[in-house]
Image (spheres, helix red, strand yellow):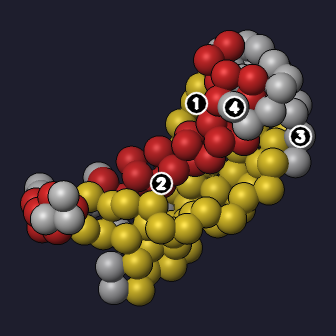
Amino acid sequence: MTIGEEFIIEKVVEAGHFASVWGSGGQDVFATPCMIAFMEGACLQLAQKDLPEGQTTVGTRVCVDHVKPSGLNQRLRIHAKLVSIDGRQLVFQVEAYDEDGLIGKGMHNRAIIDTERFMKKLNSKN
């Protein structure tokens, strides 16, 4: 992985992405949790392409502002940029745009994990 690497995903707002569906609000507008999930997904894909088999990343922190609403059928562009690497800790700058401009921005942290060890530890708690 290289600091400054970027990744973009494109989506279209569907009814299943509404705040009223996600339980985060009562309006039929693009939900903040859905925007965050798309941002996390872009970061995951950016990191995953450089990780060896058996490793992945998990989200550890999200700090995002949702600055403007988007409605049904709006075309979205979710942008992730790797800004810091500290051992297994990755920090990304994230932005979301619809056809009219910026709708969300912030930072997202992910930790590199060994998938098998992670799941063993989780399963030992049960």
- Cα distance in 3D space between marks 4 and 2: 24 Å
Mark 1 lies on residue: 10
- Which amino acid does the dot numbered 4 rest on? Gly
Q: Which residue is mark 4?
A: 23
- Where is residue 34? Give x, y as percent: 62, 36
Q: Mark 2 or mark 1: which comes first in sequence?
A: 1
Q: Nearer the viewer, residue 47 or 66?
A: 66
Where residue 115 sits in the image (x, y, percent)? 17, 59
Which residue does the numbered mark 3 point to in the structure image?
Answer: 68
Where disc 3 sits, the SS reads: loop
- Identity of the amino acid at label 1? Glu
> Which residue is labeled 2 in the image?
43
Inter-mark Cα distance, 1 to 3: 18 Å
**Residues under numbered marks 3 and 2 in contact, where contact means CB atoms less than 8 Å apart:** no
Which-is-in-front pick, marks 4 and 2? Answer: 4
Please name the amino acid that badge 3 sits on.
Answer: Lys
Circles 2 and 1: CB atoms closer than 8 Å: no
Numbered disc 4: secondary structure: loop
Query: Quick one: 50 or 87, which is closer to the camera?
Result: 87
Element type at marker 1?
strand
The answer to which of marks 4 and 2 sits earlier in the sequence is: 4
* Earlier residue among tags 3 and 2: 2
* N-terminal label among 4 and 3: 4
Going by the numbered disc 2, the residue's amino acid type is: Cys
Asked if the residues shown at circle 4 and circle 3 are in contact, with their CB atoms under 8 angstroms apart, the answer is no
- Which residue shows up at 80% across the image and 33% down it? 25
The structure residue drawn at horizontal position 81% and vertical position 19%, both measured from the top left corner, is 28
Q: Is residue 94 left or right of residue 52?
A: right
